[in-house]
Amino acid sequence: MTKVPPELKYAKSHEWVRMTDNVATVGITDHAQHELTDLVFVELPAVGRALKSGEACAVVESVKTASDIYSPLSGTITEVNQAIVDNPALINSDPYGAGWFYKLTPSQAGELSQLLTAADYGKQINQ
Amino acid sequence: MLKRTPLFEVHRKLGARLVEFAGWEMPVHYTSIMDEHETVRTAAGLFDICHMGDMRVSGPSALAFLNHVLTNDASRLEVGQGQYTLLCNARGGVIDDLYLYRLAKEDFLLIVNASRIEADWDWLQQQFQRFASDKQTKLSNESDRFGALAIQGPRVIEFIDQCISNPSTGGTKVEKPSQLKKNQIAEVQVNRESAWIARTGYTGEDGFEIVAPAQSMESLWNRLVELGQGHGLKPAGLGARDTLRTEVCYPLYGHELDENTTPVEAGLSFFVGWDKNDFVGRSKLLDQKTNGVTKKCVAFKMTDKSAPPRPHYPIWRSDANEKIGEVVSGTQSPSLGMGMGMGYVPAELAKAGASLRIEIRGKLAPAVIVPKPIYKKPV
């Protein structure tokens, strides 16, 4: 069973969001890293880039294939996690911690509540 | 509906990730490609290759027929030996690449790619009818009757003799499989049924491939798993099979090879019997050997940190803004920790040490042509 921490919000496309003081930290779920398998390369968006929710903004590559990562929220990137660029395996080993992707300042206040709760995301991946 | 091998339920129970490959539902990995790749390089991996095709040619004209349709010289095979060879069309284009084994003086086994069983079978039947053959010579497609396993890695030798413990009854005569030399094949008993074990593989590691009746695949698999347990054996999927073969630059049909590419262009001239009698495609191949080719298959490594190259990514010159070819195989090398691949470039640019650029999502990443194989086992 893959982990789905109850305090986070989730996108159907398998990204998670942690809100702290109006800054959203974004990463991919344990289920996603498990499905993607060992990651060997990550491409992150530039700091300052304005994203729309659902926009492809990062790429992760396993040995087998490249996959797009979509932003769960609209907003402006304030910080990216260079550690996962240097060591993509962090996403596999600690998807909700050291394996975070980027932080953004949300621009659409209503979007957060439209994301899935842990319970709903859990249902989606266990279907 | 995808086809399933006799080991399908075994894979499912092991929690394999199953994917479509050449019309078959096959395991791409059980744990992860990286883990299984590493296991084969350092210990032992067990692969289901039941999807591959098995064809048989036997009778007085078998050798002459095979020498007419295949590029390598089959007459060089002693009983109990195998060789890598290619099936070409009249233009020298590759219909398939395969392993040919001489099981007995007038009995040959062809192990062909799953994706090419139908094309090969059509072509072979066509050629067989046109070939002046005697009535005793038979061509048969036994792909449904036989399955196969590949067991690969440096520690296979520690337990293979426990799995097959009786002396061989045909092919190369040995007391036990570990006495087989590279490319030799022996007839052995598996579950009281006749089977064939050859010392060969598609990974660049020492190992064996076992061809046996489909119904004995599951018990053979279980026996190998049990015996290999203490020797680091793990099941390995098609994902690792692909990264392992790419590191050692073994071609994969549909990537390095197709009907518009010749063995000479692919760098496989070694497997053409230039001295034997006429064979299908010979004039084209000889012309290329004499006058040169326009494109060549090269191996390359990425030189900077970059995303892994993938099939169909464009290849650019390093010294001019010119697209010169396409990647045919590409991935991250688990052994080297860097991007690697193969691709076709104009022959005059196909020099080891030459720089290239690979277009990855609109950006050009530097690469260098390297001698094949890309990965060599440290000695």
Image (tube, rainbow, N blue to C red):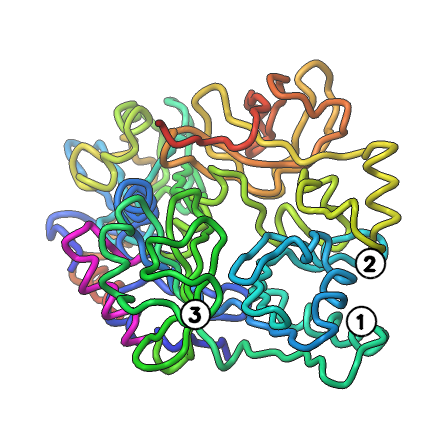
Is B377 located above or below residue B23 in the figure? above
**Left or right of B141 in this view: A73:** left
Residue shown at 16%/62% (left/top)? A119
Have a look at marks 1 and 2 and say if they share a chain.
yes
**Residue labelled with disc 3:** B187
Q: Which residue is at the front of the view, B143 or B118?
A: B143
Query: Magenta region: which residues?
Result: B218-235
Q: Position of residue B321 (x, y in %)?
A: 73, 20
Q: Are marks 3 and 2 in contact (CB under 8 Å)?
A: no
Is B343 located above or below residue B241 in the figure? above
- Disc with the residue nearer the chain's start (3 vs 2): 3
**Left or right of B151 in this view: B326:** right
Q: Position of residue B280 (x, y in %)?
A: 82, 58
Query: Which residue type carries mark 3?
Result: Glu
Query: Which residue type carries mark 1?
Result: Gln
| B223 falls in the magenta region | yes
Q: Which residue is at the front of the view, B58 or A24?
A: B58
Have a look at marks 1 and 3 and say if they share a chain.
yes
- Main secondary structure of the magenta stretch: helix
Residue shown at 18%/51% (left/top)? B231
